[in-house]
Image (cartoon, rainbow, N blue to C red):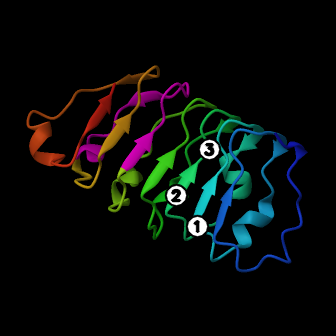
Amino acid sequence: NFHGHLPTDFSHLPWLEKLSIWRNHFKGLIPQTLSHFHHLQMLFAAENKFYGSILDFLGSPLDLNFLNLYDNKLTGTIPVTFANPSKLEHLNIGQNQLHGNIPSELRSLTHLTFFSVKMSNLTGTLPESLFNLSTLQTMSFMTNQLTGHFPKDVGCFLPNLQGLFA
């Protein structure tokens, strides 16, 4: 049950690969210095009280394969930078105070197995390109104001899908 602000100076941890700080009471901005960790593969910061824009600390693409920021107070839009050369397999940014739509650029996340933006105040049309991510096993976008429709043969496009929460 750690609390307070996450330290901003991680410069003495250049080889940090995994950072799991979930279910604590951290608050404030997620330090921008995390974007300088070129070896960081996993950031699990769910169920804290972080606020600010995701872009504030993820302005440049990272080599992450696991990003879980579920249940914080993050604001802003879903960064298009997630789609830049990415090995991202797990993306959970649900239950935050986001706005805007789901960028169609996320279609380039070809390794993605888990995608959740549930309860995030998102609007707009659900990009049909998400249904072309054949590696997806779980997809959750429930409790938003999204519109659109499922492709006719959704089962053909998502052969690995085990959970769909709309």
Q: Looking at numbered disc 1 in the image, what kind of residue is underneath it?
A: Pro
For the view shown, which residue lies furthest in the front direction? 1
Q: Is residue 3 left or right of residue 143?
A: right
Q: Is residue 59 visible?
A: no
| First to last magenta residue range | 114-131
Give the labeled residue for mark 1: 61
Is label 2 in a helix, a strand or a loop?
Answer: strand
Crowdedness of circle 2 by 10 Å Cα count: few (<14), some, many (20+)? many
> In the displayed structure, would residue 15 be above or below residue 43?
below
Question: Is 141 covered by the magenta stretch?
Answer: no
Q: Of the numbered discs in the image, which one, if any, rests on residue 69?
A: 3
Give the labeled residue for mark 2: 66
Q: Position of residue 41 (x, y in %)?
A: 57, 68
> In the displayed structure, would residue 131 be above or below residue 80?
above
Q: Is residue 57 left or right of residue 138?
A: right
What's the CA distance linking mark 1 and mark 3?
16 Å
